[in-house]
Each structure stands twice: as structure tokens, then as C-alpha cells.
Amino acid sequence: MGGKLLIVGFGPGSVDHMTKRAREAIEESDVIIGYKTYIELVRDLIVGKEIISTGMTEEVSRAQAAVKWAERGKTVAVISSGDAGLYGMAGLVYEVLIEKGWTKDSSIEVEVIPGISAIHSCAALLGAPIMHDACTISLSDHLTPWELIEKRLEAAAAADFVIALYNPKSGRRTRQIVEAQQILLRHRAPTTPVGLVKSAYRERQHMVLTDLAHMLDHEIGMLTTVIIGNSTTFVHDGVMITPRGYQRKYQLAAAVQPLKPHERLRKEAEPWALDQTKPLEDEDEGSTGAPGASGTSEAAVLAGDDQKDRAFTALATAVRPSSVATVTKEAEPTPPAAVLPTLAAPLAKTAERQPTAAPKRVKETAEDALAALERRKTRKTAAVLLEAAVSPGVANKQFTPEQLIVLAEVVGTDGKMTYTPDHYMKIERLTEDPDGLVARLVDAGLIVMPVGDVLTVKACDFCDGEKKDAIPYAEELARRFGGMALPKELKLGINGCGMACYGAVREDIGLVYRKGKFDLFLGGKTVGRNAHPGQLVAEGIPPEEIVAVMAEIIEQYQEQAHPNERFHKFFRRVKQVGRFSHEEAKPAASIETPACGE
């Protein structure tokens, strides 16, 4: 039976702002998976549960772990602060499921539980800054190209959206918020109100009200949400407010409104609306907007349309002041509010009809879209970072001069090449042709493997081939498992004789070829104050069985280990890997201090 995945957004972090369903989902779950900081925020609710917490950049491993536990029939809560569907884990969990062929008819049930996102919690603390159209933009370019983020900032600024900036700045990403401010200042006044909210509804909550010109004078970090007002946003007595536009139809201080309820949605009360900017041939109404009205002269209709056009233009230029010069070269446009009474009055004077603003804007938008499409067609492939482990072979430790020349040419002047203790060269280079560079290395007789959380085979040089009996098995293990993606980097060490001089017994998995068979060590640790050799779990494994034995161990670790869990911790936690059981190391014998004190 499949389990259940509960993707939980628990809000800003305070229990008071967590929904009842979010609390229930956490309580009913067997396993809780989340970023370390989020785990701490709900620590009181998860006592006694299986907890998997990982750091930043490990979102995919968290999603994969959640799916694995659900496949085993568990109820799993994947937690995110704010809303799980807004820069949270919901979409990623679905993507991982889809890669496995999941559908709604599959045995795993999925429920996304909404929460209060930062744009809403921070807006509530500031007042009412998102009363009108608003958008969220993340300034993190770890997953989204900065060029695309720039376009979104430009578009949102030009369209007069209230903008909430997520992930505005970190220790390494400091330039993005500066660039964002410069883009916004091209479209908005320096005095535009800006609210900075850090850790909304948490212990270290902090708020600042400033403006667009001075926002960078204040502390901004990863826990800060930046809310930038639109052209109508104002601050009153420490409260940031964006009007919805009610003042266009209502008198906010009047007890009796000039427009009756049945009049408020009439066309003449909304000169800025799309219906008011249709071409003349599409309209069948008089200047008052009454369908089928008779006795109205063509001149009055034309003049009325002119007034509507000017109202629309005024609204558009109020949104984007930079366009005023192209619409009205000498005079300021008539504000929409001033147009309202003139539309209801009789118009005796004819006027030359002006083209409406809407078709012009549609044409410009279409042209921009076509230009963007053409740029995408001609744009070069984006450079990617090639990271790889390069070696002359599993047993061979000798690079030829020709191979070193190819390696240097592939790395280039801008790349980086590092010799590692694991007997390979790690190369790093930005390139638009990673496959081509890898092909050059392979053609030179070099082995190219992935780096990171993968399996690395470390073998001795088998005494320069003199003790060569185990070499074919080492090469087969490297071919079969080398570069396999795992929850954490795993090293398989192989020694060709009982001397074990290359230290295989200290690796995560160690194989020592002795008397024609393999001895197996599991759970070694090479560094740290508690560094220790692996536990000898088997002696005399026949060579023809070693690949199957390794497959059983490695695949169990791949399937059952927590994200970022080292093999020695995994072995100690599960107690049995394959057919081999974990035994706690016996404490070292204590030696009494001699009477002489030496």
C-alpha cells in the first residue's frame, strides 16, 4: 500500500498563524522532512517522530526522501514556512513524483496544505500595501537566470505592480538587490514607499518603512521581504497603504454617494474600461452609453470617444510616466476623475477622432513578443559549469604528457584544475559545450566521472600492475557503480593485497584482496576526532560474488539513507546492510596511571 504525502505550509512561523489543518497534518505524520530552520520552528509539534532535516540547496534530496518514505506506506509531512506552493516544496515534490510515473490514480496520496506566505504576513504588519494588483519576484539566481529576473522586474515595474521581493540578498548575492533598485527607479519615483520586514511574526521581527531611493541604506538579508509600492501607494502615520481606486467612484467621507448602486457599473462611470475604448464601428450606443439610444449626433459620439480615449491615455500615463512624452507632447493629460462629469454632459462641438490607445498598446506588445522570440532563436546556448573527476584509470595513476596537454586545453585559462586525495583531477569550467569537452577527454584515454554526492571508487596502483589479480574486479566495480547518485558522497576503497597501504579500510566501504578473495570493511571514517576504520564484516568473499554483494549494499544505501547522511551513520542507524550487521565498537581499555605518576 502506498503512503501519503502532506506538503505543509505552516505560515510565518508562529503557532498563532498556523492553520488548523497544518497542525493536524504534522500531528498525523510518521515522518517530518524539512529544512533545518523550519524543523526548529515546529520542534514542539514533532516530538517522537522520524525527523529528516537538511540544509540549503538540498531541496531535491528532501523531495526524493519524502517520496521514498511514502512508497513504504508512511504518512510524510514535507514542511515549508509560508505557503508550500509559493517558492516552497509543493511543485518540486510533484516533479519528483512525475519522474517516477505518478498519477492521481497511483497508490500515493498527495495533499497540499496552504499557509500564509511572506507577502501576506509582511503586508499585514506594514498596513495594506497589496490592496491592488501585486506580484512576487525572487531575486535568487541560483535556479533562475538573472537575465530572466531582470525582465520580470522590468515588466512588473512598468506595469505598476506592487512588488514583493523574496530572497533579496545573501552573504554571496549582494549585487542583485542593487540591480533591482536601479531597474525600479527607471519606472518609479524615488519617493515610492518601500517596506522592509525581517522575520515576520517571529522572535526577531523587525520592520522599516523607507522609500525606493533609500532602501539600500537599511539592512536587507535572506530573512527580509521587500515590499515596493506602486504609483498610488502612500504612508500615513507609519502605515503603508495602496488604494484600490474606490475614490474614482465614491466620496470616501460622504454618507450619501453621488452614484446610486445601480449606476456604479454603468459604462459612463468607467471611462477607463476596455469597453469604452472599442472602435466606433463596434459600438451601438450614444455618448451616454445607453444601448440603442437615438437622437445623438455622430459628432457627439466622436467627441465622446475622444474623451474616453483621453481618459484611457491619462490612466495609462499615470501608470507609466515615461510614456507621457509619446502621448501628449505639450499638455498634461486630463485625469480620469475630471473626465467623469464631462462624459455625462451634452457635447455640442465636433472633434476629430483620435486613434485609441488600446490597439496601439496591443501592437507594441505583439512587436515586443516577436522581438523576444527572435532573440531567443539567435541567442547562444547558455554557459554551464562543467565539474568532473578526471583520471587515467582505476588502477593506472600515470598521466601521459599528451593527456595532460588535452586536460590543460579543456580546462582553459578561465577554468580550475585541482588534484585531490582521491587520485583524480577535479576540473571546473564554464562552457557552452560540456559534451564536446568530455568527449575530448575520453578520446585521450581518460576516465571522466561526476563529482558531488556520488560513488567514487578509490583503488591502489596494485604495485604498478605487479599484483594485478584484483584489477579486473576493481574496474568492473568502477564501471558499474562509479558516479552513481547517492544521498551523500560515498567512497569505495580497493586494495590489491593484505598490506592495504592505500587505506581502503578507512573508507565508507573497503575491499582488501587477500589470498584470492575479498575481505569487506563497512562504515569507516577518514577524518574528524572520531575517525576510525571500517568494521570487518566478512572475510573470504569469492571474487565472482563481489559485484552482487556491492550492489546490495550500495542500492540499500541509495534507497534508505536520509539526505546528507554519511554511510557510517546510516550503517549504525539501520543496524544491518545487506547480509551484514553493525556492531558497536568496544571502548578502548583504560590504563591506570602508574603510582609514580608517569
Image (cartoon, helix red, strand yellow):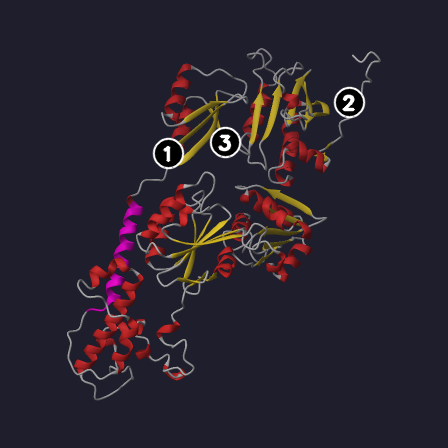
Is 595 on the left-hand or right-hand side of 385? right
Is 155 on the left-hand or right-hand side of 527? left
Between tags 2 and 3, which lies in front?
Answer: 2
Q: In the rendered view of the protein, which quadrant contains the C terminus? A: top right
Q: Which mark is residue 433?
A: 1
* Residue 358 magenta: yes
Q: Which residue was labeled with disc 3? A: 450
Residue for point 29% across, 51% down = 372
Distance Cα–Cα, label 2 vs label 1: 55 Å
Q: Which of the marked residues, 1 or 3, is nearer the chain's N terminus?
A: 1
The amino acid at mark 3 is Pro
Residue for point 27% across, 54% down = 370
* Residue 135 magenta: no
Which residue is more in the foreground, 56 or 244?
Answer: 244
Q: Which residue was labeled with disc 2? A: 588
Which element carries disc 2, helix, strand or loop?
loop
